[in-house]
């Protein structure tokens, strides 16, 4: 399954790392456009020069890991599309050009299901999407989350409670499901 990742799921870091960790487990194929990646970089610039530099380095790494993820929608496609927020049309165009099945976004109101269905697409929020993948392939999702959890602990110098980390990453349902598993109940 191909999933177009909107900027709002690529930036913040923990959400992105969980999603791409799950993608690396082979549960879905991510796609995006250069404009989506550019929005990520510009959003990180608000943290200052180091934020943008870090985002650009991370963008280079994900682009290298998924060299076929970046799609270029033709201008004629962009011109024929409409969404309630014109600034999101490029995401829909990338999804169509990349033959995605789903647009993964936190902005439900900007991607009406009816309009997406006309293009053969559906929309999902990251928490629901990842929870579904966890239910279908628990070991793969646990593996990806375990890596992100360990990295969050390492980088912060603290021991994060997994459920709190997932809640902070706007993945509360996934955190609750993971906490209920044997692998995390003892941490």
Image: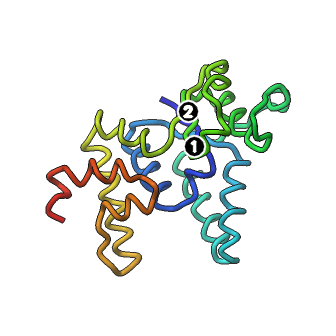
Residue 87 image-quadrant placement = top right
Disc assigned to residue 105: 1
- Check whether the beta carbons of the residues at disc 1 and disc 2 lie within 8 A of each other: yes
Pointer 1 local density, CA inside 10 Å: few below 14, some 14–19, many at least 20: many
Q: Residue furthest front?
A: 109
Q: Does residue 33 appear to the left or right of 75 in the view shown?
A: left
Residue 27 position within the rendered picture, expressed as x and y whole percent measured from the top left:
39, 37
Estimate the spatial distance between the alpha carbons at disc 1 and disc 2, rounded to whole Å.
7 Å
Q: Earlier in the sequence, mark 1 or mark 2?
A: 1
Residue 150 position within the rendered picture, expressed as x and y whole percent measured from the top left:
32, 67
From this view, report whether residue 70 is shown above or below residue 64: above
Q: Does residue 21 appear to the left or right of 185 in the view shown?
A: right
Q: What residue do we see at 63% from left, 22% from top?
A: 114
Residue 132 position within the rendered picture, expressed as x and y whole percent measured from the top left:
36, 36
Q: Residue furthest bottom?
A: 157
Residue 83 position within the rendered picture, expressed as x and y whole percent measured from the top left:
75, 33
Count all numbered tags in the image, as a single digit: 2
Q: Quadrant of the C terminus?
A: bottom left
Q: Secondary structure at mark 1?
A: loop
Q: What residue do we see at 26% from left, 51% from top?
A: 178
Color encoding of the figure: rainbow
Disc assigned to residue 10: none
Q: Secondary structure at mark 2?
A: strand
Pointer 2 local density, CA inside 10 Å: few below 14, some 14–19, many at least 20: many
User: Circle 2 sits on which residue?
Assistant: 123
Q: Does residue 11 appear to the left or right of 165 in the view shown?
A: right
Residue 105 image-quadrant placement = top right
Q: Nearer the viewer, residue 65 or 150?
A: 150
Q: What residue do we see at 56% from left, 27% from top?
A: 122
């Amino acid at each position: 399954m191909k999933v177009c990742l909107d900027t709002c799921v690529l930036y913040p870091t923990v959400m992105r790392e969980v999603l791409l960790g799950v993608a690396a487990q082979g549960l879905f194929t991510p796609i995006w456009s250069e404009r989506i990646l550019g929005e990520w970089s510009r959003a990180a610039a608000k943290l200052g020069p180091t934020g943008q530099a870090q985002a650009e380095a991370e963008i280079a790494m994900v682009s290298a890991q998924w060299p076929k993820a970046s799609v270029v929608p033709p201008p004629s496609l962009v011109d024929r599309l409409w969404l309630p927020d014109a600034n999101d049309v490029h995401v829909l165009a990338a999804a169509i050009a990349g033959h995605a099945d789903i647009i993964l976004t936190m902005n439900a109101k900007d991607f009406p299901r009816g309009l997406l269905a006309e293009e053969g697409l559906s929309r999902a929020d990251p928490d629901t999407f990842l929870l579904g993948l966890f239910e279908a392939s628990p070991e793969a999702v646990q593996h990806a989350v375990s890596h992100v959890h360990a990295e969050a602990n390492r980088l912060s110098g603290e021991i994060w409670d997994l459920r709190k980390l997932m809640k902070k990453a706007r993945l509360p349902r996934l955190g609750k499901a993971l906490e209920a598993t044997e692998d995390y109940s003892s941490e």
